[in-house]
């Protein structure tokens, strides 16, 4: 965090520093947004499925829906992503509602994650599993969607380990779905700059919306399905925009009742 | 003639954009005690991200959870500023090296390496005050505004230069503007130093201790061979030398300095002393031995925890292992043993060195002493085996 580790970006880090007021925290999240955009531009491909057979339990599949990680930004004149608290608050409400609706529309038996009390002995384990999932999702993004650093990995072969079971709620759940959504909008200054740049034939980077979803088998901890997208349209500040985003992200979700017979 | 007119037009276009892009933001007022930014503001966005970062820190395995040391650091924060202390949350992380940081929402992170380097409470208080000043003066917001304005300005200028056929000049403008960002950040640091100093004087701490923090860092930096890495055009912090002199001069003239004489050494040693063993071990593991030597020598000036300090001096020489370092290590370990707080592992370290040098009897005695003090040590079986061998 501060990864550590957490300076160094922007070349701000010099030896023996006291407390650079942390821009890093602000900067890191948009990096995911930018990373998805770059990666998607580099190699456009759809969701990844693990080779392992998805064992459908008897009866309807119970999906644990994790609280969505939502952040909205304004793209400044210079192209920085500035986090927006009010938009994010609205976006978060919209996305969580959209997840509920899309799950219901697809007749899935969805359970929504509830944070445990801090004194619950399971609380720490859950927090660690969620943190691990975050790290694994970033790794998949790098390894399976980026040619730049590691060479492209074709296969989806990752696991959170058996500790994933810590997430199973009292009523039970078979799978957990994790959703991250980022959305950005050009400021007035950015729009003006884009307009002027267009006059001299230069195209400037657009504000984008990006999403990431990861489906984990709670018995084994294996990541069995993974999807990312980035697009230049959409608006998570509106309920309908959030529904569109979730539908795009989960379009090929393998656990919808009507797609399950494929397995 | 048309050529001429087009040129004037281009230059006019360029300057209009230059003025439009270069507008400055109004100065930022202090954060008021208890104030939270309105959710619609840029500042609220920065707080939101900082709140998320704080959640991550809370689950970090590196967090120092020891209640005593946390209570102690917190008490200094509250002494420095009763008005803001409720808004500031201090997290001590177990990490070598000198660093601390502050986020706009009031999360302060202090590295154990910094606590290790402080010689007394006044020095620690100065660094805490410096960080608190970043919070009160809203430096993250200021910095974000500067970066935002500068990058915006650069974008506009690049377009303008492109439009007027002067695209080649873009990198130069970029360099100048980026230098401006770093200069602004150095100004923030100077301001935090000044406010930190004022806070410790008000709380009764000896102001001359502030400049010593930078003096010691400077000595550390000089001890490292690549001493020139810190200073450059892009340096975010003013040079330690400059800070040291500025603070030392300020300390002489600041009102109230004559009454402020506290260093609270006793309370400081009581709270920090028990952790020095572990923190020195972590510091040594970094492998920057020449630098750590400076740290230990600075701590040895104050005649506390001498057994532990001399032991780690011995460890440092043993690890460095050049020329006469083994002799120096033996000397340091032996010195450590003359103090009541020398750790039992000092005997083991001595024993191993003697063993390596073939001084069997001395090795036997030292290892024996170790086992007497730590009969249930993790490595007791191995040590017993060595003892059997050397009989």
Image (spheres, coloured by chain):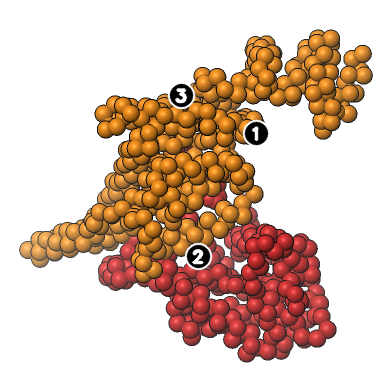
Parent chain of label 3: B
Q: Which residue is mark 3?
A: B219
Residue B210, given in percent of the width and then of the height, sits at 39, 31
- How far apart are the two marked residues, 2 and 3, measured between alpha carbons? 42 Å
Residue A73, given in percent of the width and then of the height, sits at 42, 68
The answer to whether residue A165 is above or below residue B387 is below
Q: Secondary structure at mark 2?
A: helix
Quick one: label 1 or label 3, which is nearer the N terminus? 3
Pointers 1 and 3 in contact (CB under 8 A)?
no
Pointers 2 and 3 in contact (CB under 8 A)?
no
The image quadrant where one finds the C terminus of chain A is bottom right
The answer to whether residue B337 is above or below residue A107 is above
Nearer the camera: disc 1 or disc 3: 1
- How far apart are the two marked residues, 1 and 2, measured between alpha carbons? 40 Å
Count the marks: how many?
3
Q: Can I make out residue B366 in this image?
A: yes
The residue positioned 68% from the left and 79% from the top of the image is A111
The residue positioned 71% from the left and 89% from the top of the image is A258
Which sits in the foreground, A74 or B204?
Answer: B204
Chain that appears orange: B
The answer to whether residue B113 is above or below residue A8 is above
The colour chain A appears in is red
Q: Which residue is mark 2?
A: A33
């Amino acid at each position: 965090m501060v990864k550590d580790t957490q300076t160094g970006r922007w070349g701000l880090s010099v030896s023996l520093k006291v407390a650079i007021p942390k821009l890093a925290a602000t900067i890191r999240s948009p990096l995911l947004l930018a990373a998805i955009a770059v990666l998607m531009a580099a190699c456009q491909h759809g969701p990844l499925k693990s080779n392992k057979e998805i064992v459908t339990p008897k009866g309807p599949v119970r999906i644990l829906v994790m609280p969505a990680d939502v952040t909205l930004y304004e793209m400044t004149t210079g192209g920085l992503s500035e986090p927006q608290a009010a938009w994010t608050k609205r976006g978060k409400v919209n996305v969580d509602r959209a997840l509920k609706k899309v799950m219901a529309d697809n007749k899935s038996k969805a359970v929504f994650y509830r944070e445990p009390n801090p004194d619950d002995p399971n609380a720490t384990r859950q927090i660690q599993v969620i943190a691990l999932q975050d790290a694994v999702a970033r790794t998949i993004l790098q390894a399976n969607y980026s040619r730049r650093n590691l060479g492209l990995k074709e296969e989806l072969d990752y696991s959170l380990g058996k500790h994933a079971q810590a997430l199973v709620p009292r009523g039970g759940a078979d799978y957990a779905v994790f959703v991250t959504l980022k959305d950005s909008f050009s400021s007035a200054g950015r729009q003006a700059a884009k307009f002027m740049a267009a006059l001299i034939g230069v195209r400037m980077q657009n504000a984008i919306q990006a999403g990431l979803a990861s489906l984990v088998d709670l018995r084994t901890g294996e990541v069995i399905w993974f999807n990312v997208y980035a697009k230049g349209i959409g608006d998570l500040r509106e309920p309908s925009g959030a529904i569109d985003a979730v539908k795009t992200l989960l379009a090929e979700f393998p656990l919808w009742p009507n797609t399950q017979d494929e397995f | 003639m048309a050529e001429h007119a087009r040129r004037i037009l281009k230059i006019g276009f360029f300057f209009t954009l230059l003025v439009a892009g270069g507008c400055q933001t109004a100065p930022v007022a202090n954060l008021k005690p208890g104030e939270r930014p309105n959710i619609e503001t840029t500042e609220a966005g920065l707080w939101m991200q900082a709140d998320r970062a704080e959640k991550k820190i809370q689950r970090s395995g590196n967090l120092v959870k020891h209640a005593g040391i946390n209570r102690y650091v917190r008490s200094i924060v509250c002494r420095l500023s009763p008005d803001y202390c409720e808004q500031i949350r201090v997290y001590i992380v177990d990490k070598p090296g000198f660093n601390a940081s502050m986020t706009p929402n009031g999360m302060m992170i202090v590295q154990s390496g910094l606590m290790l380097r402080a010689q007394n409470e006044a020095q620690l208080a100065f660094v805490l005050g410096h960080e608190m000043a970043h919070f009160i003066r809203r430096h993250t917001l200021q910095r974000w505004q500067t970066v935002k304005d500068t990058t915006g300005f650069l974008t506009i200028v690049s377009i303008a230069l492109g439009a007027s056929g002067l695209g080649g000049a873009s990198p130069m403008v970029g360099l100048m503007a980026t230098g401006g960002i770093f200069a602004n950040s150095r100004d923030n640091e100077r301001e935090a130093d000044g406010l930190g100093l004022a806070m410790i004087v008000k709380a009764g701490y000896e102001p001359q201790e502030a400049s010593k923090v930078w003096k010691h860092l400077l000595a550390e930096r000089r001890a490292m061979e690549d001493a020139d890495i810190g200073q450059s055009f892009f340096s975010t912090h003013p040079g330690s030398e400059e800070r040291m002199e500025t603070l030392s001069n300020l300390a002489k003239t600041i009102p109230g300095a004559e009454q402020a004489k506290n260093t609270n050494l006793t309370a400081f040693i009581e709270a920090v002393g028990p952790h020095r063993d572990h923190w020195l071990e972590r510091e040594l593991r970094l492998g920057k031995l020449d630098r750590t030597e400076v740290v230990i020598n600075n701590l040895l000036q104050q005649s506390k925890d001498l057994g532990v300090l001399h032991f780690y001096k011995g460890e440092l020489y043993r690890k460095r292992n050049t020329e006469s370092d083994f002799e120096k290590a033996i000397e340091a370990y032996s010195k450590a043993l003359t103090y009541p707080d020398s750790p039992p592992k000092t005997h083991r370290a001595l024993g191993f060195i003697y063993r390596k040098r073939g001084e069997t009897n001395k090795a036997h005695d030292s290892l024996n002493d170790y086992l007497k003090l730590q009969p249930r040590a993790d490595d007791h079986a191995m040590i017993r085996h060595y003892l059997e061998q050397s009989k």
